[in-house]
Image: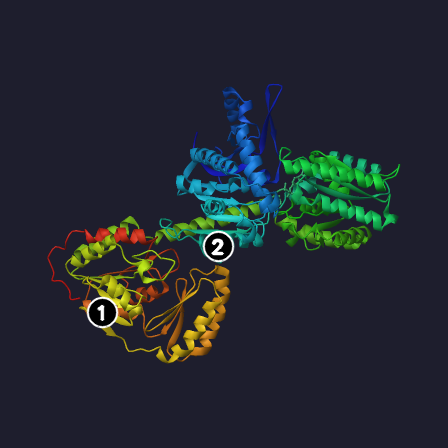
Amino acid sequence: MGKFKFLIVSNRLPVSVAKVDGKLTYTPSSGGLATAMSSLDVGSTGDTGSAERLWIGWPAIASDDLTTADRTAITRTLRSYGCYPVFMTRQQIRLFYEGYCNDTIWPLFHYFQSLAVHSSEYWSAYRQVNQLYSRAVARHAGPASTIWIHDYQLMVLPRLLRSRLPGSSIGFFLHIPFPSFEIFRLLPERKEILQGLLGADLVGFHIYDYARHFMSSVLRTLGHEHRRGMIALNTTNSYGRSVAVDSFPIGIDYKKFVTALETPEVRAEIKILESSYKGQKIIVSIDRLDYSKGIMNRLEAFEQFLKQYPKHHKKVILLVVAVPSRVEVEAYKDLRDTIEQTVSRINGVYGAVDWTPISYQFRNLPFHQIVALYAKADVALITPLRDGMNLVAKEYIAAKQRKTGVLILSEMAGAVDELPEALRINPNDTASIVKSIRTALRMPKAEQRSRLQSMQRRISRYTVTRWAKDFIEQLEYAQEMKIEQRRTGLAERDQTRMLHDFRQAKRRLLLLDYDGTLHGFVPSHHPADAMPDRSLMELLGRLTKLPATEVCIVSGRPRQALDTWFGRLPVTLAAEHGAWIRQRGEWAQEDVSLQEHKAALLPLLERYAERTPGAQVEEKNFALVWHYRNVQPELAYARNANLRHDLNAVVGSNSGIGIFNGNKIIEIKPRNISKGVVADEMLAGSGADFVLAIGDDYTDEDMFGALPESAYTIKVGGSETRARFHLPGVESVLRLLNLLSTSPQPPESHSRTNR
Ligand code: GDG
């Protein structure tokens, strides 16, 4: 089978397979997603004219019911629909689909934490099934495929694919809410889930609140920061890869509803409804039977309405369509019983021989009946307790081309942002629903029309097709950014040239930052914890032994620490960003002072630290440092803003003292001390014709900026920089330095520089 350019991966395929009387049957679903995908330009036709896109998913039948011949036949037939099946056993369906997906993730992500079941068996099935998907995708994807993964059943798949297909472009869209960190943290597997999602280049949500929750969970759980919708991954071999996060509110196939209204089936169905409910106003309620949809809240409110307004009896009917869903999951069985008992009770109390207040159907209706219901209903009552988007609300609006109607919509549905002309309710506030039902039934036609038109204008533009195109465009953009970023990485070619220049140079100067460059960050700032290990000392020793090579460690650390660690090596040391310099074994001090401000600054910092768990204050000779690496990030954000404000008030603007943001630190120090000054002086003193400067921090930017164009400047990590190249992390820096330290000697031997 050939390699595909565009792959869609979702739990269910758009075609369902069943076995009826021993025969395989295929039912294509006409869902919104399938329509959206068919309208996408990506991979629609190739040069050969053959289809280059493939949809991978489960064909909705357990593999236990299939013979090998059945599976072959299914695979062959699905191929003609552009699909490829991932088969699951009954056991996998039970543990993965009914278990982890619908008994753990679904309730938790919809804020029903008490319904969420935590089972290691579920989780291992989830991982196993995601592996099945990753194998199926890897089999069909080319080296530069675009892969779009859908929904909560496949959250660890992006990472699995990233390691199998590093060059591909991977997008992920979540169709349900992403909960706030306070809820998400309850999930034992939270780390793996987030790492899984971060395998994608773009992670999309319906609304910005979900995106915000996701980014905050990533920050709190994994420590990756985000800026302007980009999460920067600072892992060792990610090359500073970034993941884009954005919101894309899914739309509907608007035209499909408009045209359906004119079909004979829909018209006939509308007639049936008109004659069945003559003289009565219809309130419609359609959803999958799911506890997140607030069906009980709606029934209670309708009962309350009947109780409060007897004059509406026999003049209104509530049509409840509850579509069977996840019928094997316990919580759904219980809910069905409760709903059915409540409907019977209300009908028993308020009904009459010639009037049943609630008509209830537990079944899947054909499309034309759904459209007719939308068109005819005077009110749509949609009251989810949580809903990622809610398409029924949008479909109801689309089906109101000739007739009028009022939408009552829960504030907890993602759709509410785009439908502000609906009557908004809080599903827990029964009185507000009752009031809205009354308002809706009495709303003048002209007002109904004007509200509908505003909403129609909006949802007819951002259709499901636009949504899908928008997502793919953003994914392509994220991919371009990634390529751009990789270009500035230290490619094989650049490394070879650097080694060549290094070997050829008459004098070489190496300017090396310490923390985050030669040594990984340690959460504490106790000097002992950040001590160099033997292999690093040996590496530095080897570098200093190279002829005509000067090694300078340029650090923000105090000179005592540098002296203790590197004192016996013949290296130049620049401590406290250059406030102290040790050359030829002698420390010399720059002429600066923070002294006069310390008396006011130190107590201020300490006061802040006392009420900021995790914060530490460090006093250096020429600087004061506020460390917030171990502070809860959102608290740190708030505290830092206030702290900077107060510090500014103390030091004033003309004092020669600057307040600098570093890597999880705020540093207060004299402005004339910088690594840039050190680099400048070192370069002038050494007369080097080969300069390599490596650093990870904002203070290293001064060093990069001070050096000539020809210098090899390398930023460790992915963020913006003045350096020419990037390296992903400490390990890669050490690898590079090792290469230099073992590189052949220059053609002629030079005298060693003084240190
Ligand atoms: C998830 C998220 C998000 C309903 N009954 C029948 C029927 N339907 C169709 C509707 C609508 C779809 O099913 C339901 O979509 P919703 O968006 O309302 O809800 P979920 O199924 O929970 O979907 C949700 C969505 O994903 C998309 O991202 O909006 O928040 O939970 O299209 O028309 N269709 C037919 N017969 C029925 O009886 N034919």
Where does residue 697 sit, x and y in percent of width and height?
36, 62
Where does residue 389 sit, x and y in percent of width and height?
62, 47
Q: Which of 187/685 is in front?
A: 187
Q: Which of the four quarters of the rendered structure image does ligand 1 lie in?
A: top right
Quick one: quadrant of the N terminus?
top left
Is residue 47 visible in the rendered structure shown here? no
Q: Which of 521/119 is in front?
A: 119
Relative side of 223 to 18, left or right:
left
Q: Is residue 592 above or below residue 577?
A: below
Q: Which of 623/499 is in front?
A: 623
Q: Is residue 674 above or below residue 403?
A: below
SS label for mark 2: helix
Where does residue 681 sit, x and y in percent of width and height?
24, 70
Check disc 2 and give the amino acid type.
Arg
- Marks 1 and 2, the one that precedes in the sequence: 2
Q: Is residue 193 above or below residue 652?
A: above
- The residue singled out by tag 1 in the image is 582
Quick one: quadrant of the C terminus?
bottom left
Mark number, residue 220: 2
Mark 2 residue CB less than 8 A from any atom of ligand 1: no
Check disc 1 and give the amino acid type.
Arg
| Quarter of image, res 594 | bottom left
Distance CA(mark 1)–CA(mark 2): 40 Å
What residue lies at 39% left-to-right and 43% top-to-bottom?
A: 167
